Image (spheres, helix red, strand yellow):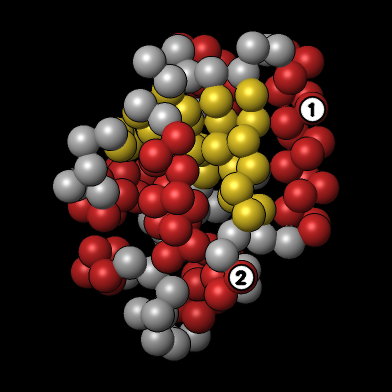
């Protein structure tokens, strides 16, 4: 069984995240969305809420599972038996950042491959950071997040 992990903070999940998931699901037998607790970030939403949102977004796809995790993503992959890690790339700076992480992960666990999926050009400017900023300033985020997320935001 080809299992992939799509890790992230998803704080909040955006339509760009959903697009990457929808485009990657046909490549694998199962994709686990790993909702990470990032010690370097102060989250807007608790992990439990982010998991609920993602479960609602993907409730009709039996190939997708949502799980919270802490610690090194590569260790989470090993625990799951996931040999692939999906990463979305929006910009050149995303690529440079993700490339460095992928190379370190390869050193730690050579059997796990990082799969980069380029963002749909229409979504390249959408990030959770920008969505959080719009929310803080009472702006309309409905164009940037899946409808299932709106009741939580």
Nearer-the-camera pick, 120 or 39: 120
| Mark toward the viewer: 1 or 2 | 2
Residue 2 coordinates in the image, percent (x, y): 43, 20
Name the image quarter holding residue 80.
top left
Which residue position holds label 2?
121
Q: In which quarter of the image is the N terminus?
A: top left
Residue pictured at 19% horizontal, 47% vertical = 59
Residue 5's place in the image compared with 148, above or below, is above
Tag count:
2
Marks 1 and 2 sit apart, C-alpha to C-alpha, by: 26 Å
Picture coordinates of residue 43, whole percent (x, y): 49, 53
Q: Residue drawn 29% across and 64% down?
A: 149
Which residue carries the number 1 mark? 103
Q: Residue 141 vs residue 38: left or right?
A: left
Farthest residue, direction left: 60
Residue plotted at (50% across, 80% down): 134
Question: Residue 122's quadrant in the figure?
Answer: bottom right
Task: Assess disc 1: are there few (<14), some (14-19) or many (≥20) residues with their C-alpha within 10 Å of its C-alpha.
Answer: some
Left or right: 100 with respect to 56? right
The secondary element bearing badge 1 is classed as helix
Mark 1 or 2 closer to N-term? 1
């Amino acid at each position: 069984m080809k299992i992939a992990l799509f890790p992230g903070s998803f704080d909040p999940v955006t339509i760009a995240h959903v697009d990457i998931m929808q485009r990657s699901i046909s490549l694998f037998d199962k994709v686990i969305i790993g909702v990470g607790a990032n010690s370097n970030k102060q989250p807007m939403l608790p992990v439990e809420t982010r998991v609920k949102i993602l479960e609602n977004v993907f409730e009709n796809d039996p190939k997708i599972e949502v799980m919270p995790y802490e610690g090194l993503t590569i260790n989470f992959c090993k625990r799951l038996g996931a040999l692939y890690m999906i990463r979305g790339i929006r910009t050149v700076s995303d690529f440079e950042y993700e490339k460095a992480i992928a190379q370190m992960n390869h050193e730690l666990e050579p059997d796990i491959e990082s799969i980069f999926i380029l963002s749909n050009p229409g979504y390249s400017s959408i990030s959770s950071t920008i969505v959080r900023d719009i929310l803080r300033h009472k702006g309309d985020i409905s164009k940037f997040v899946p409808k299932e997320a709106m009741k939580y935001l």
